[in-house]
């Protein structure tokens, strides 16, 4: 079935460092791809999304490009801040049906001053 | 964006009692709602999918008699953990969608069974 594989954490970076969190997917159709962020003690918030190949989702300095050829949707940010410390989840939603979203295991990011 | 409100955010209950968690879509009609459970340092595990007006579809390994789901209206779904035990302590999150759009998540409910 459809699934998402996400880079294992935890990831610890210094402020202003470059961030990459890898995410690859397996899907039979043409899924939409998402990155969600979960701050401590809170629920999930949509960070960005892409609905078709070559689309780039972006928000709050984060970017991810839907790469069909490599079945990837890696999350990047050029300069992280302490406030970016959170758990990041890659997810996909299969097209054309009413199924739920499939999530990766999550990557915990800690940014130190 | 669309808002999903989950209540309560935290609840502590005694072992053997039942607890109800509500999930409401505030500004849209949710044809489908999902209930997830999140174990510490783990990803979300789908428990069940509910469509308004019909019985919930449970994932394999989830006890439907223990985790009762009701989706009586297009804006409300409830999860009742019956006869709760300490191993049911977890973070429960709902999400809601309409049609084939993305799902919007509630804030989550941290359940502690003592």
Image (tube, rainbow, N blue to C red):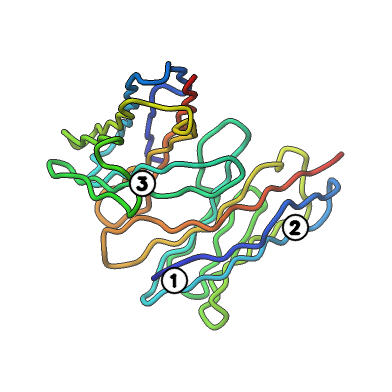
Q: Secondary structure at mark 3?
A: strand
Seen from the viewer's position, the closer of residues B97 and B28 is B97
Q: Which quarter shows the N terminus of chain A?
A: bottom left
The residue tagged 3 is B47
Per the image, the residue denoted by label 1 is A52
Confirm or deny contact between disc 1 and disc 3 (CB under 8 A).
no
Q: Chain of mark 3?
A: B
Contact, mark 1 vs mark 2 (Cβ under 8 Å): no
Q: Earlier in the sequence, mark 1 or mark 2?
A: 2
Crowding at dot 2, Cα within 10 Å, few <14 / some 14-19 / many 20+, comes out as some
Q: Residue at x 12, y 41 (%)?
A: B53
Select label 1 or label 3 by which is in front: 3
Instruction: Specify the subunit that label 2 lies on.
Output: A
- Give whichever of B108, B59 is nearer the camera: B59
**How far is the residue under mark 1 from the one under mark 2?**
23 Å
| Circle 2: element type | strand
Q: Is residue B55 left or right of residue A59?
A: left
Location of residue A46 in the rendering, given as x and y in whole percent from the top left corner? 50, 47
Mark 3 or 2: the one toward you:
3
Please, which chain is the residue tagged with disc 1 on? A
Q: Residue B71 placed where, x, y %?
A: 20, 36
Neighbor class of circle 3 (other Cα within 10 Å; few <14, some 14-19, many 20+) is many
């Amino acid at each position: 079935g459809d699934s998402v594989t996400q880079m294992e954490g935890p990831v610890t970076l210094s402020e202003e460092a470059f961030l990459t969190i890898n995410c690859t997917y397996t899907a039979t159709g043409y899924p939409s791809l998402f990155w969600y962020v979960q701050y401590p003690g809170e629920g999930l918030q949509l960070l960005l999304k892409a609905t078709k190949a070559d689309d780039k989702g972006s928000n709050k300095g984060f970017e991810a490009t839907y790469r069909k050829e490599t079945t990837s949707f890696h999350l990047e940010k050029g300069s992280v801040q302490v406030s970016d410390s959170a758990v990041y989840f890659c997810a996909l939603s299969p097209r054309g049906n009413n199924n739920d979203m499939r999530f990766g295991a999550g990557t915990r990011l800690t940014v130190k001053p | 964006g669309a808002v999903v409100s989950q209540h309560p955010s935290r609840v502590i209950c005694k072992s053997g009692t039942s607890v109800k968690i509500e999930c409401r879509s505030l500004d849209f009609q949710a044809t489908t709602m999902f209930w997830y459970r999140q174990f510490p340092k783990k990803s979300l595990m789908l428990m069940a999918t509910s469509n308004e007006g019909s019985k919930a579809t449970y994932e394999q390994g989830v006890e439907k008699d223990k985790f009762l789901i009701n989706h009586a209206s297009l804006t409300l779904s409830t999860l009742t953990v019956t006869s709760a035990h300490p191993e049911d302590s977890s973070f429960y999150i709902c999400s809601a969608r309409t049609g084939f759009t993305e799902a919007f998540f509630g804030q989550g409910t941290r359940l502690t069974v003592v």
